[in-house]
Amino acid sequence: MLKEILKMFRESGGPLDLKALAAKLDVETSALEGMLTTLVRQGKLREVEVGSADCRACHSRLTCAYMVGGVSLGKVYELPEG
């Protein structure tokens, strides 16, 4: 399952949120969150702190699908740079 998750991130070309990813994989968000935490610990993914300095520097911050009115819609993950 972890390989499938990483494949989805590579194919997406950008960040994915927990709820959407859980729906695509047809798994409970609580189970998926544990798997994502494992991948983050391994350095294969990183959790995006929506609304952080990374977001303020993002050119898409005003139209971001993960924020509404400056409020995060949930946990978001992405492949690490490099």
Image (tube, grey):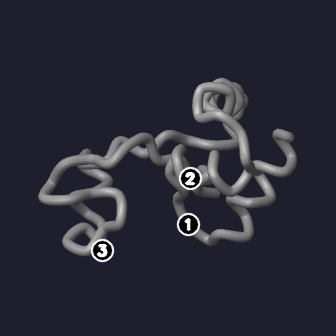
Secondary structure beneath label 2: strand
As drawn, the label of residue 14 is 1
> At x 74% / y 50%, what residue is drawn?
25
Q: Nearer the viewer, residue 81 or 21?
A: 21
Whole-percent x, y for residue 34 in the image: 65, 24
The residue carrying mark 3 is 60
* Amino acid at dot 3: Ser
Pointers 2 and 1 in contact (CB under 8 A)? yes
Furthest-left residue in this view = 69
> At x 63% / y 43%, what residue is drawn?
45
* Amino acid at dot 2: Glu
* Rendered view: 28 above or below 79: above
Give me the C-alpha separation between circle 3 and circle 1.
Answer: 12 Å
Pointers 3 and 1 in contact (CB under 8 A)? no
> Could you classify mark 3 by the number of other residues whose Cα lies within 10 Å: few (under 14), some (14-19), or many (20 or more)?
few
> At x 68% / y 27%, what residue is drawn?
31
Pointers 3 and 2 in contact (CB under 8 A)? no
As drawn, the label of residue 78 is 2
Whole-percent x, y for residue 42 in the image: 72, 29
Secondary structure beneath label 1: loop
In this rendering, position of residue 19 left or right of residue 48: right
Tell which circle, 3 or 2, labels the residue nearer the N-terminal end: 3
